[in-house]
């Protein structure tokens, strides 16, 4: 058992922190919680996180200690769309215009919550694997 | 729920670095006086928006819970960048 984990558990047993706080701290030190559904979809069937992992390898195929791991909550997308829907029409128009100039025909007001849920459900199946000579990139949702 | 703990770990090639667990409640409390100072300005801005745009201006009030939701959804974000010499970890819990 590592030192940080021991410290958190002793703080819990001494009553300095609550069970919920201990759970959060264990998450923070990298101890995975059991049965929390972190490694699957949420109770609503939607993926909870978008993961981006980049690993590099040397010429012998051994993994170098050069990694980038990013975990983004999907709730962030929902919250972003919610804010976008509250934007004044002229601001939305400006965004649509800028996207059009970049070649993306896009109407911000067309993104509805129901469509977003469908999109997020579809993302459950998303998995992008790019294997290069020295790098491997993996993008997936869970 | 707003993130309550921010973990920031930075380690350099000599193995020295910091491993911080920052209780964000303190940050929120520190920001509170600034929010209270800005409130009258926000109220003036809101009234101006309602005057100018009518009922459409009232949607600006909905921005407050929307921004709080956005901040809350940041909870669970993790960024880890490691190489042979250094390591940076940022987690919002």
Image (cartoon, rainbow, N blue to C red):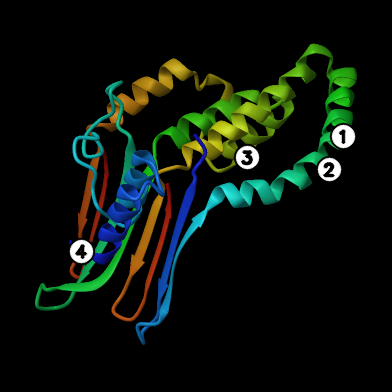
Residue A131 lies in what quarter of the image? bottom left
Q: Are marks 2 and 1 on the same chain?
A: yes
Q: Which residue is mark 3?
A: A98
Chain letter of disc 1 in the image: B
Instruction: Tell whether label 4 touches label 3 (CB within 8 Å).
Output: no
Which is more foreground, mark 3 or mark 4?
A: 4
Q: Between tags 1 and 3, which lies in front? A: 1
Identified at 24% across, 43% down, the residue is A33
Question: Looking at the image, is A18 positioned above or below residue A91?
Answer: below
Please give the residue where the numbered disc 4 appears in the rendered image.
A132
Residue located beneath label 1 in the image: B40
- Judge if badges 1 and 4 mark residues of a common chain: no
- Tag 4 and tag 2, C-beta contact below 8 Å: no
Q: Are marks 1 and 3 on the same chain?
A: no
Front tag of 2 and 3: 2
Q: Chain of mark 2?
A: B
2 and 1 marks in contact (CB < 8 Å): yes
Q: Is A78 drawn above or below residue B6 in the view shown?
A: above
In depth, the one of B84 and A113 nearer the eye is B84
Q: Which residue in the protein does label 2 denote?
A: B37
* Badges 4 and 2, same chain: no
Horizontal side, residue A105 vs residue B34: left or right: left
Q: Quadrant of residue A42?
A: top left
Q: Find residue A129 and name its label.
A: none
Q: Is residue B67 visible?
A: yes
| Secondary structure under the numbered disc 3 in the rendered image | helix
């Amino acid at each position: 058992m590592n030192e940080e984990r021991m410290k958190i558990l002793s703080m819990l047993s001494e009553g300095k922190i609550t069970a919920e706080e201990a759970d959060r701290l264990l998450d923070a030190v990298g101890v995975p919680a059991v049965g929390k559904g972190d490694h699957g979809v949420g109770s609503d069937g939607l993926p909870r996180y978008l993961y981006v992992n980049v690993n590099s390898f040397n010429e012998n195929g051994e993994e170098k200690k050069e990694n980038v791991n990013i975990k983004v909550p999907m709730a962030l997308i929902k919250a972003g769309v919610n804010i976008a829907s509250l934007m004044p029409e002229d601001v939305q128009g400006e965004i649509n215009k800028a996207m059009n100039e970049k070649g993306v025909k896009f109407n911000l007001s067309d993104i509805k919550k129901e469509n977003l849920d469908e999109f997020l459900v579809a993302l459950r199946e998303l998995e992008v694997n790019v294997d290069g000579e020295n790098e491997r990139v993996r993008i997936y949702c869970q | 729920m707003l993130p309550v703990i921010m973990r920031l770990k930075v380690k350099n090639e000599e193995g020295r670095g910091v491993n911080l667990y920052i209780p964000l409640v303190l940050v929120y409390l520190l920001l509170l006086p600034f929010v209270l100072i800005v409130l009258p300005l926000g109220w003036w801005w809101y009234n101006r928006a309602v005057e100018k745009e009518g009922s459409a201006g009232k949607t600006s009030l909905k921005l407050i819970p929307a921004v709080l939701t956005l901040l809350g959804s940041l909870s669970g974000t993790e960024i880890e960048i490691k190489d042979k010499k250094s390591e940076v970890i940022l987690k919002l819990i």
